Image: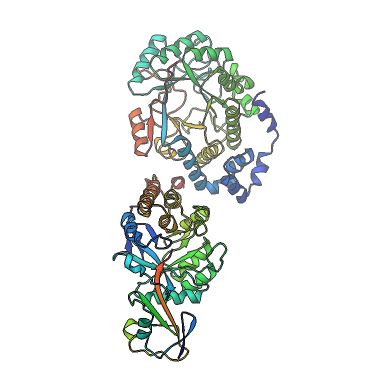
Amino acid sequence: MDIIVNGKRETGPPCSIAELVARKGLLTDGLVVELNHLIVKHEQWQAIRLKENDAIELLSFVGGG
Amino acid sequence: MSFYAHVEQYGNFDFPRFFEGVSGDAVERSLAKDKLGPVDFLNLLSPKAAEYLEQMAQKAHRLTIQYFGKTIQLFIPLYLSSHCSNQCAYCGFNRKNDIIRRTLSLREIEAEARAIALTGMRHILFLTGESPFHTPTEYLIQASECLKRHFASVSIEIFPMDEADYRGLRQAGVDGMTLFQETYDPEVYRRVHLAGRKTDYRYRLDAPERGARAGFRMINIGALLGLSEPRREIFHTGLHGRYLENRYLETEVSISLPRFNDTEGSFKPDYRIDDKSFVQFMTALRLFSPKAGITISTRENARFRDRLLYLGATRYSAGSCTGVGGYAEVKMQQSPQFEITDTRNVDEVAAAIVAGGYQPVFKDWDAIV
Amino acid sequence: MENGPLQLGHVTFTNRLFTGTGKFAANTLIPGMLKASGSEMITVALRRIDTTARSENILDYIPRGVTLLPNTSGARNAEQAVRIARIAREAGCGDFIKIEVITDMKYLMPDNIETLKATEILAREGFIVLPYVLPDLPLAKRLESAGAAAVMPLGAPIGSNRGLETMSLIAILIENCRVPVIVDAGIGRPSQAAAAMEMGADAVLVNTAIATASDPEAMGRAFDLAVKAGRIAFLAELAEPSAGASASSPLTGFLH
């Protein structure tokens, strides 16, 4: 399955958002997920399965002025 | 070289036409400037500028605080003599007036000085009419020396003198002089000064300069507002002050705005200066000459003087008596030179200044040499 | 006027120094800096996670009680700014948002027009909008009408540390804006922060100068003192004589 993660095309097995996050070894604390321009609440990561060509943004807060 | 060159220069200047042509823009431009020239000064003296009075006042207020802080220098006048050989149409001491004439003896001066010193005042201005017979130079020198023993600063407001005489007084302890030109208009001057040495316009006009050359620290000038068209008079006064400031860097220049009181004598001045105009002239002077002192005497009433604190004033007389002497023996019959309207005593004036958020300064400085 | 707190949205700030999390040598310096400066609001940015490296969560370094001010840095237009704002709110950052839309990569000047557009949208959505702009009075009035909680004019270009280059323009905003004016960008020294407060600014935002100081904690404290000093000085100057003064003509009203 092809999806776009942070603007880059990726290929991988079908999964839920939670699984994708875990696969990337990311801490969930402070992580913000946007799927096709819609923010997905933490509680729903487990339930939502990614589809072909989904664009997912994995964001977090960083230092900034 | 004399300030007369300026007076001549403006002899034929069409003031009314100029004032007519002053636009709001012109006033605003002049208001915005830091260094004002004569034309800016005229703009601010124009009838049009009256519409900008609050802005003028705000700027004058700021400039005064910037250069003078929130202080008012206090001084007290002492008339030594009401003998006078001049015939000035407007003056209480006019030789034609049938009044009580007195000249204080040195002992009396001493008594007055002691009484005045009790009020806390440390700056004294002594005045005379013009009578070389009653108050010759020697008398003036002795009076100065006497007063200098009691006061930190002694100024004179007497008839114009030669530079040598001024030097003599300087040596005797006098550090300042006040001399009003009365009117800068030679025509009007001629009309109101009917006889006596005072008829000499030029001699009087050049006297402040002679005083500066003689070493007086402070020169106070002014025109008696009402004798001639006041905007012009203030204009000339301001230019006169600037002339002195520019030429005599060691001299402080102060400007007074004496105007006729309604109650004053039988002389009816041609022009009446209302409070609004007075404030306009005062603030215009402040804007034109940010560093010049502005002296307000007890001709102005208490309520008005309290307001003038914020409008550029820097020197106030207080507890004044404009009859001869009058401090040591208050019960003595008096023939005052002009009507006082601020009749408050020194403490009351000082308290009013404090209540207004300013500091009354009794002693500004001391000569230690 | 008393030395009272600053109200932005529903939050009351007693400290008028706002800070930023950018450019610190290490995020571990941030808590100490916040404590030393007493700052009650700090900016954060939103970025894509770098999945190849272990990234920290900046929010871990910001104690409870300090208001988060996410900024929309990275946005090149109003639409992107709005998106970032919504993400930040969804992520639990609260309602504050600093709109920073920069299309000029040379000087990093804010795009006033896009910022206004973003403000109009976000204010309607209930955000507490702090727009970062080039000082421009007509624009500031429009931002006010649009519902901005404050106006944040830059003192000088970001990172230039040139102090209050735009001082006279900021002064105009202070005089004419109803909403608070918070000077952002360009403040390189505590004295500049004091100067901004003396002029009547309601608060300042300082990031680079503190974060890049050798001792950010000490510098944070210095800025705190400077901001307080400037504020007290400003209030001290406001006391003017009155007694029967009319509001519009305090000095000459008595003549009429």
Q: Is residue B328 above or below residue C188?
A: above
Residue B97 spot, x, y in % from top left: 51, 19
Q: Quadrant of residue B120?
A: top left
Residue at coordinates 49% horizontally, 10% vertically from top-left? B134
Residue at coordinates 40% horizontally, 52% vertically from top-left? C214
Q: Quadrant of residue B230?
A: top right
Q: Quadrant of the C terminus of chain B?
A: top left
- Please give left or right for residue B351 compared with residue B233 in the image: left
- Please give left or right for residue C168 compared with residue B15 in the image: left
Residue A58 spot, x, y in % from top left: 41, 78
Q: Quadrant of residue B73?
A: top left
Residue B228 spot, x, y in % from top left: 59, 32
Which sits in the foreground, C222 or B216? C222
Q: Quadrant of the N terminus of chain B?
A: top right
- Please give left or right for residue A61 compared with residue B25 in the image: left
Residue at coordinates 46% horizontally, 79% vertically from top-left? A6
Q: Is residue B177 above or below residue B24?
A: above
Which sits in the foreground, B329 or C85? C85
Q: Is residue C169 above or below residue B5?
A: below
Instruction: Judge whether residue C248 can be spotted in this image.
Output: yes
Instruction: Judge whether residue B136 can be spotted in this image.
Output: no
Q: In the displayed image of the protein, which residue is found farthest to the left?
A: C64
Residue B319 spot, x, y in % from top left: 38, 26
**Callout count:** 0
Q: Is residue B124 above or below residue B41?
A: above
Colouring chosen for the image of the structure:
rainbow
